[in-house]
Amino acid sequence: MRALLLENLHPLASSILSEAGIEVETRPGALSEDELVGCLDRYDLLGIRSKTEVTSRVLDAHPHLVAVGAFCIGINQIDLDAATRHGIAAFNAPYSNTRSVVELAIANIIAMARRLTERDKALHAGVWDKSSEGSHEVRGRTLGIVGYGNIGSQLSVVAEMLGMQVYFYDTDEKLALGNARRCSSLEELIDTVETVTLHVDGRGGNAGIFGRQQFERMRPRSLFLNLSRGFVVDYEALRDALVAGHIAGAAVDVFPSEPRRRGDAFDSPLLGLANVILTPHVGGSTEEAQEDIGRFVGTKLRDYARTGSTALSVNLPTLTPARNVHAQRIAHIHQNTPGVLAHVNQVLAEHDVNIGGQVLATRGQTGYVVTDTGSGLSSTVLEALRSVPETVRLRVID
């Protein structure tokens, strides 16, 4: 098998795959849709971060791909419907860089509350501007977290340890940690807090959730952070609120349009504002987080390729088949309709194939069965299995 790893993934990912006998090629930047369509014929596994868009066009052109790994939290850059349609597994790293994003959020909150960036720029310009005006402790301030998932909930705990009063809003029911208080609506949260930070996922329904109306509703001289997704905020409206002085400071790590490669030109309506901290999507970019992501996703890709394990796959049914002694292992992805398993086993029985072990799982409209056989499988058997009408993908794992 061959793997293509893009966007400067941690070397540990390459090591994990190489040690499993998978040939690995790495490239430093992201690839465009046309570039992916043109080059993936040679590869079975694809590793990306947030800049590479694996669209339905890419997947339709390369249905032979075995799996795609997103070495980050977000998965919206992969067309999961198309991947599932072709039986291509998708994996991400939902937990590995949580702490890194939380620490950046805390650092930004403190830096804005103390006006550190403005003091830094003044001193670099040779101006001694020692004053307490506009500088505040974060202790006792109210923090509103929009999105109480892995990052939002851990931020809640750390912020509370610093003495902040935490409120959160999430569309799903979430257990409040510590003394955090749940708000019933985004409007209630905005009305309650002095600092708002966004930690929502990339689902389409979150597009534009924070715009001019929300900024106008925020308390005067509030702070605002977005370390989640660029398309969830109207940055023109944020600029207007900052220039007017209604928002005292903002920290932004994600943007609607981001350069594909390091060193490329960048533009934003927020450029040049002294009370804004801009970072180039580095929330999870610490050496510790990237090493852990490389290990986590690299291991998931390796295990799926070599054993058929779909543990923590974002689109396929979850199976962690035991490592039974077998001649060959059949991984069969199919449409989840009644009678498919019986049909598969009938084919095996008709060809005198003994089943040594078998596990099945379903997820929505997709089923996944892994079967260990006691003998090698002929091309006739494999063709009969592929001919099962509900078959989406058949892999033989030696």
Image: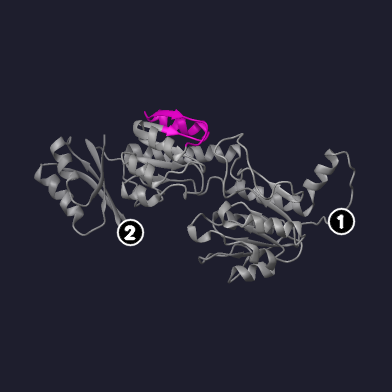
Q: Secondary structure at mark 1?
A: loop
- Labels 1 and 2: the sequence-earlier one: 1
Which residue type does callout 1 highlight? Glu
Relative to 210, 59 lies left or right: left
Residue in the foreground of this view, choosing between 220 and 375 = 220
The residue at 69%/50% (across/down) is 270
Give the quarter of the image for residue 280. Answer: top right
Residue 81 placement (x, y as % from top left):
37, 52
The residue at 79%/56% (across/down) is 137
Read off the magenta span: 4-31
Which residue type does callout 2 highlight? Gly
Residue 364 placement (x, y as % from top left):
33, 59
Instruction: Tell me: residue 155, above or below residue 307.
Output: below
Relative to 282, 382 lies left or right: left
Pointer 1: what residue? 133
Coloring scheme of the render? Answer: one colour
The residue at 56%/54% (across/down) is 231
Dot 2, crowdedness within 10 Å: few (<14), some or many (≥20)?
Answer: few
C-alpha span from label 1 to label 2: 57 Å
Q: Secondary structure at mark 2?
A: loop
Pointer 2: what residue? 364
The residue at 85%/39% (across/down) is 125
Instruction: Tell me: residue 108, above or below residue 295.
Output: below
Magenta segment includes 17? yes
Residue 156 placement (x, y as % from top left):
63, 58
Give the quarter of the image for residue 134. Answer: bottom right
Instruction: Tell me: residue 171, above or below residue 27.
Output: below
* Residue 115 visible in the current orientation: yes
Relative to 353, 193 lies left or right: right
